[in-house]
Image: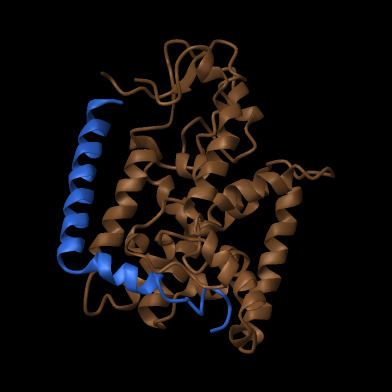
Chain colours: A blue, B brown
Amino acid sequence: MNKKNTAITVITLILAIVLIIAGIYDGGYNDVKNKAIRICYECIGIG
Amino acid sequence: MSVLGSGESEKRAPLKRRYIQLLAAVFYNCNIKGFLSGSIYKGDIKGLCVPGLNCYSCPGAVGACPLGSLQSGLLSSKYKVPYYVLGTLILFGLMFGRLICGFLCPFGLLQELLYKIPGKKIKKNRITVMLTYLKYVILVIFVIVIPLVKLVPGFCKYICPAGILEGGIPLTYMDPQIRGLIGVLFSWKFIVMVVILTICVFCFRSFCRFVCPLGAIYSFFNPISFFGIRVDNDKCIHCNACVKNCKMDVKRVCDRECIQCGECIKECPVDAISYKKIKK
């Protein structure tokens, strides 16, 4: 991996971690969980 | 530390892949109770996204589908940006790129098993290469625009074959109330699923190559992912054996179409291809 790619990788990693922390902080984890614990009628083709 | 071992073990990596794919599929769907009762898992860990395409309405699913979660997040993005899902997708992509398609996707495993059914096979050609761009169109229209504009999860609702296969069929079979709600949409999704799975018998990983928006997202990370395939340019003699023998529409190893399955490792006459290693 060249220096340019390494820099992109590091910046992207920091971005991902910041987004996940920000997401957990503003309730994103619970939003995903609340969607996932209910049957998704669109997904299963009911509507 | 090697990702999948070193030396001879790297050469044998493709043989191990099937076991990893199977383990991932079982791990994503280990809620056996759900299959017996016709209900879905509702535990606290369901908020964690799994890396591969796996419907969270599958009775066995213990994690969330990243694509479904992204669309769901975009539906309510007027009020809240889905930072958590975006961060998770970026992290998965950065860690593994499309290695996830090759190793950690249950629907990828199903497609590969279907391709093992004997019969005439469609090899990659100019048309299949062009069709690889379709998944980016589907990503933009069905995963981003339709959820933002129409406020429905476009891909899940109209296309996703994993939803009907893993969630729709078992739940309608086991739950009479859900069965009573079957309508035109169910028929549409069922036909889409049958068409996609049938094409997979003749065309290697056709859903993965032409349709899957999750693969499209991960493809952007292939050049910078921590784990995956690498080519030693000092050893490479540019014989192109890797690309010629690859069933995906790759132009070079580890480009956006490469699912990092490692099949090319054994094709390389000078051992220039290997899995990336993490330096100690």
Q: Nearer the viewer, residue B34 or B187?
A: B34
Q: Nearer the viewer, residue B221 or A28?
A: A28
Q: Residue B20 location, x and y as percent? A: 53, 37
Residue B85 as seen in the image, left or right of residue A15: right
Q: Residue B108 location, x and y as percent? A: 58, 48
Check the image and report above or below for B88 versus A42.
above
Residue lying at 48% horizontally and 12% vertically, measured from the top left: B7
Residue A15 as seen in the image, left or right of residue B127: left
Check the image and report above or below for B278 versus B104.
above
Q: Which image quarter: residue B268?
A: top right
Q: Residue B181 location, x and y as percent? A: 61, 88
Residue lying at 59% horizontally and 67% vertically, measured from the top left: B36
Q: Residue B101 location, x and y as percent? A: 51, 45
Residue B243 as seen in the image, left or right of residue B98: right
Q: Nearer the viewer, residue B52 or B42?
A: B42
Check the image and report above or below for B277 versus B148.
above
Examine the rendering and report whether any part of residue B159 can be seen: no
Examine the rendering and report whether any part of residue A34 can be seen: yes
Q: Quadrant of the C terminus of chain B?
A: top left
Residue lying at 20% horizontally and 56% vertically, measured from the top left: A19
